[in-house]
Amino acid sequence: MNTKVAVYRKEHFNAAHRLHNPGWDDATNAKVFGKCNNPNYHGHNYELIVKLIGEPNSETGYVMDLKILSDIIQENIIQKFDHKNLNEDTLEFKNLIPSAENIAIVIYNILKEKINPALELQIRLYETERNFVEYPVN
Amino acid sequence: MNTKVAVYRKEHFNAAHRLHNPGWDDATNAKVFGKCNNPNYHGHNYELIVKLIGEPNSETGYVMDLKILSDIIQENIIQKFDHKNLNEDTLEFKNLIPSAENIAIVIYNILKEKINPALELQIRLYETERNFVEYPVN
Amino acid sequence: MNTKVAVYRKEHFNAAHRLHNPGWDDATNAKVFGKCNNPNYHGHNYELIVKLIGEPNSETGYVMDLKILSDIIQENIIQKFDHKNLNEDTLEFKNLIPSAENIAIVIYNILKEKINPALELQIRLYETERNFVEYPVN
Amino acid sequence: MNTKVAVYRKEHFNAAHRLHNPGWDDATNAKVFGKCNNPNYHGHNYELIVKLIGEPNSETGYVMDLKILSDIIQENIIQKFDHKNLNEDTLEFKNLIPSAENIAIVIYNILKEKINPALELQIRLYETERNFVEYPVN
Amino acid sequence: MNTKVAVYRKEHFNAAHRLHNPGWDDATNAKVFGKCNNPNYHGHNYELIVKLIGEPNSETGYVMDLKILSDIIQENIIQKFDHKNLNEDTLEFKNLIPSAENIAIVIYNILKEKINPALELQIRLYETERNFVEYPVN
Amino acid sequence: MNTKVAVYRKEHFNAAHRLHNPGWDDATNAKVFGKCNNPNYHGHNYELIVKLIGEPNSETGYVMDLKILSDIIQENIIQKFDHKNLNEDTLEFKNLIPSAENIAIVIYNILKEKINPALELQIRLYETERNFVEYPVN
C-alpha cells in the first residue's frame, strides 16, 4: 500500500444565482429550471470542501498546511464569490450556467493553478444540505 | 407546574437578499452593511424553526399536528419566500430591510394570523449556521 | 443576577412506535394520525437532551457531574426505551399515546425522581431533525 | 481527466425493523443480533443519500435535475418504506434480513431500474448518525 | 408584546484543559474528576454561541451588527483561549477550575464589559456535542 | 458488479496535542506550526470514522457486526487516546508528530491487526469540523 493521505478543508460562501440558458426562450427556461430560473435570483449558503491527496511530509506530518490551504481558498474562491451574484458579478459565470456542477468545475480549475501539482485535488460543493456535487470523479 | 409543552417544526427556504437603506447614500450603505450591501444581491439557505407552546390534547397527545403546522408554513412562508429575491419579489420587504431580525418578525406576523391564538408562537431563523435570530423574546 | 448555570447532556435511543387512540375506530385513527397510525409500527432515532439548572459547586465547578447524569439517563431511560416498541414493550405507553409530547413528559417524570430536587429539570426530545418538543415550558 | 461529476441527493424515511434469521432458534437470534432482535421491533430515522456520476449536460449544467431525482426517490423508495415496518409491511424484506447493508442493496436495485443507465449509481444509508453503509463499492 | 429580538453568533476555539482542585489530594481529584483529571491535560473543540437581546434599530434592521459582534468575540475570547492550555496559559483559570460552567461564566464576564449594556447577554458553550452549558439562566 | 458493501462506524475521543519537531529550533517550530506549536498544548474533540469493505454474510446481513467493531475501537483506540495528551501520554507519538495525518495512520495500523484481514479498512479522522483526513487512499 502507498502511504498517501487525503486531507480536507471546509470553507463557505453565500451567493445569489439563477439558472437560465440564454439560448432558450423564457417558457423553456421556466419549464426546465423551475423555481431556480426566478428572474430576480435566489441564493444559497454554499459549503465547499477541498480535498488534496499526497504523501505526508516526514518533518511536519502534513500533506499540506491546512492554514495555507485555507488562505488559498479564501483569496481565490471566497473573495471572488462570497456575497456576490454569480451571474452578474463574476466573469466565470457570464456565459456559463451556475449549476452546482459548473461551480465545482470552476472552483477546481481555479485552485488547480494555485496548488502543488503533485497533490491530487477534488472539490465537493454543497448547494444545500440535500443537494451536493463532487468533481472530478476518480 | 403547568402541563404545557413546546413543539417545534423546522423548514427551510433559499432566497436572495440585499441589505440597503434607501434613505442613505451609497457610501453610507456600503460602510454600514459591507458585503451584505452588494447591489446585485447575495443569498442564503434559511433554516426556519417554528415553536408553539400549548397543552397536549388528551385524545391525540399532540399540542398541534406537526404535519398540519408544516402545511401552514409551506403555504404561507415557503411558497412566498423560497427561490425568491426578498427585496424584489416580495411585498413584505419592498420598504423593510430584509435583515434576519426583520424576516423573523415578518414570518411571526404572518403565521400569527394562521395559527390557533391559544398557542404561544416563536420564530427562530438561521441565516447561516453561525448567524441566527429569535422572535419574540419571552 | 443569580449565578445559576444550565447544563445539558445529550443521549439517544432507537424505538418503534405507533400513534393510535383505542377509543376511536380505525377510520378515525387513520384520518387523524395518517402514516403514524401504521398498524405494524414505524420507528425513530430519538435524540434526548436533558437540561438541569443550578448553582455550580465551588469545589468542582460542576452544577452536576455530567458523567453521573449520563449514567442516570442510561439506567432509567435508555435501558427502558432503546431498541423497544414503545406501545408493546413498555408499561408507560400501554395506555398513553407515544407522541413526542407524551414521551417527553414521561421521561421528565421518571428523571425527576432520580435527580437532586434542587436542580430544575427540562427535557427536549427530537423525534426527527425536523420535529421536536420540550417539557416543561418555563 | 474526464469531465464527469458526481451529484448527490439526500432524502429520509422512518421505519421499524427487526433483525431475525428464521432459520435459527430464538437463542441464537438473541445472541447474534442482541437488542436488534427485539420481537416487537424497534426503529430508525434512515437518511438516504443517492449518488449519480455522469457528464453535465452542456445546455442545463446538470448531470441530472435533482428535483426529478428527488421525485423518483420519493415515488419508488420513500412511499414504499416511510412509516412502515420493513419486516411486516414490505415484500422486499419478507425473506431478507433488513440490515442496513441489505436495505442499501435493495434500494440500489430498485433505483437502478428507474434511472438512466448511463449514470453510475451508488447508495449511502445512515441507520443512525454512527452506523452507516455504502453500496456498491468501486 | 415588546419588539425585542434575540440575535446569536457562533464562534469556536480549540483548547487543552484539566479539571483539578488543588485543595484536594490526588486520589480525591482522580475519584471526582476521573479522566478529566489527567495530569497532562486533554482537550476540546469548544463551540461558543453568544446571544444578545435588544430592539432592532429601525435604520439598519440590526439588533447589533453580527460582524462587529464576531470581531469583539475574536479579539476578547478567541485570541485569549484558542490553541491554549486553559490551566497553564490563561490568568482566568490559574485559580479557577476550567469546567464548562466556569468557562461560560468567565466568557460572560469578559464580554459584558465590551458590549452595549442595553443588550441582554447570554453564553452557550459546547464542550462536546453531548455536553454543553448556558449562563446566565433567565 | 461485485456485491461488496462498505460499513462505517463513528466514535470520538478528546485529546490534547502539540505539533513540534524536536529536530528544529523553537523559532522554526513556531514559524511552521504557528498556534499548533503552543508549548502547553491545545486540544480537540476528534471524530473517528472507521470504514470496512466486504461481502455481507448471507445469514446475518452484516459485513461485520458494528457493535463488535465499536467494541474493538473502544478497547484499542478510545481507551488509549481519550482524555489523554497525545505527545506525553502515548507511546505512539513519543517520536511522531501528532498531526491529523499521522494520527489516522497510527489508528489504521492498530486496527489493521485487530480486524479480519479479508475486510478492507479505511480511517477518516476529523480534527475539527473544518479540518479532516483519510487514510489510506484507494
Image: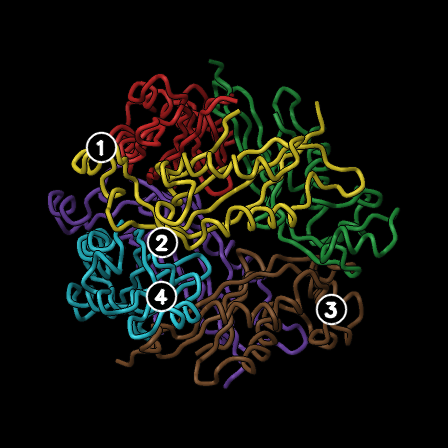
Chain colours: A cyan, B yellow, C green, D brown, E red, F purple
Mark 2 or 3: the one toward you: 2
Mark 4 or 3: the one toward you: 3
Element under disc 2: strand
Crowding at mark 2 (Cα within 10 Å: few <14, some 14-19, many 20+): many
Amino acid residing under circle 1? Trp
Quadrant in the picture for residue B120: top right
Q: Which mark is residue B24?
A: 1
The numbered mark 3 sits on a residue in which chain?
A: D
The numbered mark 1 sits on a residue in which chain?
A: B
Task: Please name whichever residue, E100 or B65, is drawn nearer the observer in this view of the structure.
Answer: B65
Amino acid residing under circle 4? Tyr
Residue A11 percent coordinates (x, y): 30, 53
Query: In this figure, which residue is indicated by the disc labeled 4?
Result: F135
Answer yes or no: are tags 1 and 2 on the same subunit.
no
Q: Which mark is residue A43?
A: 2
The numbered mark 4 sits on a residue in which chain?
A: F
Mark 1 to mark 4: distance in Å?
Answer: 55 Å
Residue located 55% across and 72% down the image? D72
Answer yes or no: are tags 4 and 3 on the same subunit.
no
Answer yes or no: are tags 2 and 3 on the same subunit.
no
Mark 1 to mark 2: distance in Å?
Answer: 25 Å
Q: Is residue A102 above or below residue C90?
A: below
Q: How many marks?
A: 4
Residue contact at pointers 1 and 4, CB within 8 angstroms: no
